[in-house]
Amino acid sequence: MVNYKDLGLVNTREMFKRAVAGGYAIPAFNFNTMEQMQAIVMAAVETKSPVIMQVSKGARNYANASILRYMAEGAVAYAKELGCEHPEIVLHLDHGDSFELCKDCIDMGFSSVMIDGSHLPYEENVALAKKVVDYAHQFDVTVEAELGVLAGVEDEVSAAESHYTKPEEVIDFSTRTGCDSLAISIGTSHGAHKFTPEQCTLVNGVLVPPPLAFDILHEIEKKLPGFPIVLHGSSSVPMDEVNTINKFGGHLEAAIGIPEEQLREASKSAVCKINIDSDSRLAMTAAIRKHFDEYPSHFDPRQYLKPARENMKKMYIHKIVEVLGSNDKL
Ligand code: G3H
Ligand code: 13P
Ligand code: ZN
């Protein structure tokens, strides 16, 4: 059993309290590779931002659970080496789908876990979340639970349709489970294809998706004043990255994300954690495709992973400073 506090990590409790009061959101960036981890830490240090580094079940399968845990410990040391005396880094399990997976992560040094029972019948979601909370809180590990279903198909996270969170359920759910934060469904979804072109309106040649359900968010805020709310599926799918990918041999059709103004607006509310994964994938892929086109003779991974890392870092900094507002909050 390893406690996250011994690794220099922090849980989300104080971080979220400050974010809700301050009207900003903490970035939750997924990582699977060393370059993503480095880019996240460099961006957080340069902007003096707290940060959540999250690991999905798919990431654990890809990179190995122990390696990712040691990378997070390394991230704390790296942040200090870069000049940040007191980094605030959370190591979070993203979309935990069982008590056993959450327990395994808690036991190996995670400071926060998500138990995603959103696809289960309500009472089963409550029971599972409560079981995880009861275990996690013994070690001061914070727990995110989810009510409402996001659409989107990914390796380990899939649902054909979304179902918005029902505001009338949130008080009962948060009280009975004791969860520390609640992920809600208000129109975001996972992946790089969040909307079909038919769902969007063409404005000045740009496809603008329908707005998020801010009315539901505000109703939830009224029912749970000051309670930390989480938005998954919040990549914006920048058109310049999609265009670069397509220009250099890729084939991404109708990739559409959440407009950044809407995330900016959400960050000012009780939304205090915003999950971004696809934008990092796009930034990495765009830089690598461009590099291979410009330097067809290159085959040393450092030659193409360096610009990929730079591009991800630029994107992370942009999100922190221009969208979530978590800069200068350490
Ligand atoms: O919400 C899902 C994250 O983007 C993780 O995706 O399961 O493909 O690692 P993944
Ligand atoms: P995106 O696919 O929009 O980046 O969402 C990531 C996410 O919600 C991770 O849990
Ligand atoms: Zn998610």
Image: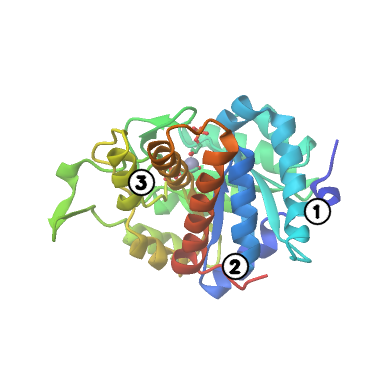
Report x, y in % for residue 100.
69, 27
Picture quarter with the C terminus:
bottom right
Residue type at mark 3?
Tyr
Q: Is ligand 2 less than 8 Å from the beta carbon at label 2?
A: no
Query: What amino acid does circle 2 point to?
Result: Thr
User: For residue 47, which numbered disc appears in the image?
Assistant: 2
Secondary element type, mark 1? loop
- Whether residue 121 is visible: yes
Badge 3 marks a residue whose secondary structure is loop
Query: At x 60% / y 52%, what residue is drawn?
Result: 40
Instruction: Give the number of marks.
Output: 3
Q: Is any part of residue 127 visible from this angle?
A: no
The residue labelled by disc 3 is 164
Q: In which image quadrant can residue 251 be found?
A: top left
| Distance from mark 1 CB to nearest ligand 2 atom below 8 Å | no
Left or right relative to 19: residue 74: right
Q: Is residue 299 above or below residue 71?
A: above
Q: Which residue is mark 1?
A: 8
